[in-house]
Image (cartoon, rainbow, N blue to C red):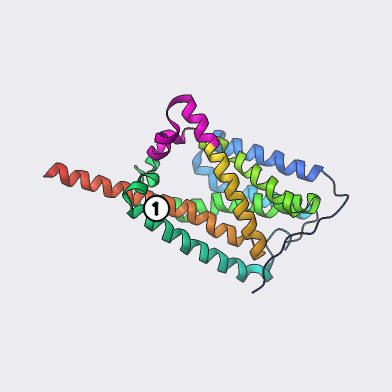
Amino acid sequence: MIGFYAPEQVTGLAWWPLAIVLIALVIFNIVSNRVAPQSHYLLWAFGGSVILLAIGLLDGNSWTDMGLGWQYLLSGLIWAAASIGLVTLVYAIGASIKKTRAAFRDERMNDLTAGKLAFQALIEVPFGTVLFEEIAFRAVLFSMLARRFGVVWAIVLSALIFGLWHVLPSLGTHEQNPALGSVVGEGRRGNVLAVLASVVTTTLAGVVFAGMRIASGSVIAPMGLHWATNGLGYAFSWVIIRSRGRRRRIEGGE
């Protein structure tokens, strides 16, 4: 099985293409979280992915440099399948234990129908969030950083930028997740701590995703783990919330 690939460092590369990518990420983050309606998110994600790939190619990165080489596809698929299986097992165990079950309770899932859940978990997350973020951070940005500063700095910087990317989406999450709220508290202090926790955890996740990308040679590998943690998380949360609601109705009827 082919694996373990990262772009080689090249001297004398211009800085401005990297600056353009960072500016584009800031604009996309603000627009997708504060300006554009949620119904347009998939369009924004696909368009943003195409634009970033075009910048990466114009910067001299090959498809293989960006983790999109065909020769690493099988390796990426194997890593992705293994990570999805592992996350499923961990979530199933966590959801079955009373002390850890509260961590899956995301109140945003409370009003979702089964159809909306399926759309969010199987369409919006993989073809919106996962596609764009893996193309942006593990394909284009990682390759551009590796070719300028080396692999180690590419891992560190891409993971840190990935963590900062989650500042806007994490605002108010302490009010939507009871388990998180019980840890960080309420009000402004709780909000600040929730944001810091999100930045730290997603930065660490970025390191893991980058490591999978290198080990497999393909961004398909982190895409699998990324989708599993998000998409399956929504699914488990929805099932737990619905099960709790049914139990309350039954108890109320009794």
Where in the figure is residue 185, as x and y percent of width and height?
43, 30
Looking at the rendered structure, the kind of residue marked 1 is: Ala
SS under mark 1: helix
User: Which quadrant holds residue 72?
Assistant: bottom right
Q: Is residue 85 magenta?
A: no
The residue depicted at 55 percent of the width and 50 percent of the height is 128
The residue under label 1 is 235
Dot 1: few (<14), some (14–19), or many (≥20) neighbours within 10 Å?
A: some
Q: Is residue 55 visible?
A: no
Give the residues drawn in magenta, as a range. Answer: 172-196
For this rendering, which residue is in front, 200 or 249?
Answer: 200
Q: Is residue 178 magenta?
A: yes
How many marks overall?
1
Most extreme residue toward the top, as rendered?
188
User: Which quadrant holds residue 252?
Assistant: top left
Q: Left or right: 162 with respect to 151? A: left
